Amino acid sequence: MKQDQFAQARGLSSAEVSDALDYFGLPGSAVGVRPVAGPRKLFGPAFTVRFGPVDTSQPGTVGDYLDEMPAGSVAVLDNAGRPDCTVWGGIMSQLAAHRAIAGTVVNGVCRDTQEADAAGYPLFALGRFMRTGKDRVQVDAVGGAVSVAGVRVSPGDIVVADQDGVVFVPAGRAAEVFERALIMQAVEARIVAAALDGMPLAQARREFGYHTLQRKPAQNA
């Protein structure tokens, strides 16, 4: 994906990217994952971590993977959607913000959200809960495929998140998905402009093909 495309894509909303994913018949929308702290905008490549139940015979840790994360990446943590213990807290938010990590998405819950707010660190999750994951879960894998709200996410997939939620774009399809999203964004802007200029909304939508924007090409034939 070219640098200028990447820069343009940063301005897209999760809704616009979701529509583009629909156009190509791709999954990607993480149901139930929402902003819980910090700025409600996030964009960057996924750095994936998968957690599992703790091995009581050889207790693990909730992970020191932050040392491996490059600036600009997004921590995508799969804790199997567990609501009873956290895998991200205040220490991580403060250090991640200091190291220019783009943000964190958790398939599960997080805590210390006040510290994420204070650090200006974007944090998205299924919810908030105060109980630690230490001695309850451990890191099973860093850098492999994970699942977030039923969406498969691989390292390097692009994370787009805002106040409406989180979508994941497969790295190998990012260029075409973002190109389509930008086309759709431009069409919708033309619809709004025409309607504000006096054209009936139904006519503007019909004239610019609003109702078929997100349909797969085969469905438009």
Image (cartoon, helix red, strand yellow):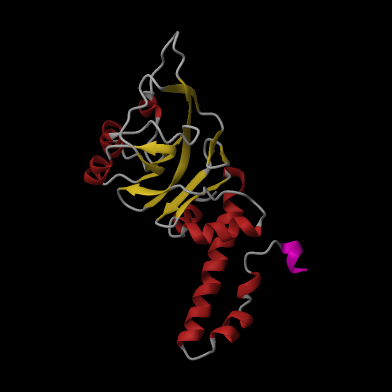
For this view, does 88 lie left or right of residue 9?
A: left
- Majority secondary structure of the magenta segment? helix
Residue at 67% x, 54% y: name it: 25
Which residue occupies 47% across, 82% down?
193
- Residue 54, by quadrant, is top left
Q: Is residue 218 magenta?
A: yes
In depth, the one of 87 and 159 nearer the eye is 87
Q: State whether residue 13 is above or below residue 35.
A: below
Q: Nearer the viewer, residue 89 or 71?
A: 89
Q: Looking at the picture, how far across and down is residue 140, in whole percent? A: 49, 22
| Residue 49 pos. (x, y %) | 47, 30
* Magenta residues (range): 217-221
Residue 82: quarter of image? top left
Please determine whether, in this image, residue 165 is positioned above or below residue 62: below
Q: Residue furthest bottom?
A: 198
Q: Residue 1 location in percent, x, y?
A: 55, 48
